[in-house]
Image (tube, rainbow, N blue to C red):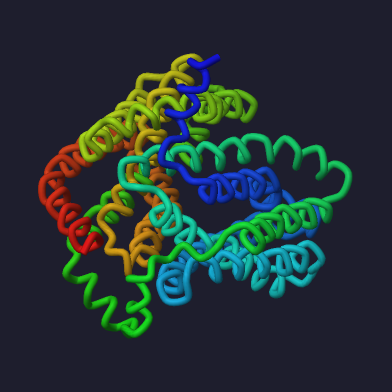
Amino acid sequence: MSTNKSRFASLTEGLPPTYWLIWTGTLINRLGGFVIPFLTLYLTAQREIPVSQAALVVSLFGAGSFLAQLTGGELTDRLGRRPVMLMSFFITPIFMVILGLERNLLFISVSTFIVGFFTDLYRPAVGAAIADLVPSAARTRAYGYNYWAINLGAAVAPLLAGLIADYNYLILFIADAITTAAFGLIVLFGIRETRPTEAHHSTHATATERMQQLRQEPILLVFSLLALFFGMIYMQGNVTLPLDMQSHGLGPQQYGATIAVNGFLIILVTIPVSNMAARWPRFETIAISAVLLGLGFGFTALASRLPLFMLSVAIWTLGEIAATAVAPAIIADLSPVALRGLYQGIFGSAWGLAFFIGPLSGGWIYEHLGSNTLWLGCLILGIGLAFAYLGMSKPAKRRMERTQLTSSD
């Protein structure tokens, strides 16, 4: 009994109750993430919008999400973490329901962009709040556990959504709105403002002055650029992997089984990997993650049967898990207290941009240069990213030490 208690204590050490409220809200919100996975199907089947136009509408969600990361980061530092989260969680449900009711293509497009914007506006605020609440030594675990909650919800939500969609699509939008608002209620009644008092002076700086300060932060910009390339590799699992499997005679059912390996491993090993990664040097850990990502996608060039495709997904999933726990912790350690929201927003926007560029670049290479060129390119890029992460390790550590000294003054 005492062994179980000590094990539980080691898992939760350094994570205050407010963090667990954020974690719970994240899980509830993601368990109700019904609309986005089914948006294309809804637009084509229920609203009879052509596939090409439906794809354009869905891309507007991505555009809103990208803009939300930058805007949310700026507002998080200026207004505080709590107001931005409340704004996101209570405005999103309104437009979510409007989107489910709207029939005009123009209004559907506008509503989709607005939903994309407000749905992700909270992300920099949550990232900054975790940095406020959790000491540096526990941040890798904190971000890793939150990532686990996101993916647990993302694994369950499509199953529930499929059952609901067979009955009534509008219920998807209403249920998604309710779970989003539920996170808002948790914030409203359970979470106080976490922004440190020393960060309040940032509200007096103009946006131009804050952006000029970023020019003196090459490590953040380089790290975000590397995240862009990391994300571009990762996106091939959703875009070109199913095309390559199809060319080997494996259809949607086999692809679904293959990509399920990703979700299964994330749920199974994220917590132990996050605990181990918390004890490892961060830049060395993310370098290993990049190698695993490159190896996993590079191995796809050798795959022709279902088990080999599953093995390739398993390899790059391990890289994904470690990186998504360590990278936000690195950003939190790099960021001055007054710029935590902006730093999280810039890093998040790099991933958002990868979700746009990755499919375009990967699809072009696959179509014009062939699948082997694409997978070899992923391998080379992953190894190159690993060397880049190792190369910036020492200057980044010096930068983190200066940030910690400044924060402690």
Residue at point 25% right, 31% down?
280
Residue 197 visible, this orientation? yes
Choose between 201 and 392: the one closer to the eye.
201
In the rendered view, does 334 fall on the left or right side of 113?
Answer: left
Q: Which percent across, then down, holds residue 67? A: 47, 69
Choose between 397 and 194: the one closer to the eye.
194
Q: Which percent across, then down, holds residue 182? A: 71, 55
Residue at point 25% right, 53% down?
223
Q: Classify 219 as above or below 155.
A: below
Instruction: Name which quarter of the figure residue 167 lies in.
Output: top right
Choose between 104 and 229: the one closer to the eye.
229
The C terminus lies in quadrant:
bottom left
Number of labels in the image equals 0
Q: Which residue appears farthest toward the right when viewing the image?
A: 167
Residue 376 visible, this orientation? no
Q: Classify 67 as above or below 126.
A: below
In the rendered view, does 195 fall on the left or right side of 181?
Answer: left
Residue at point 34% right, 32% down?
293
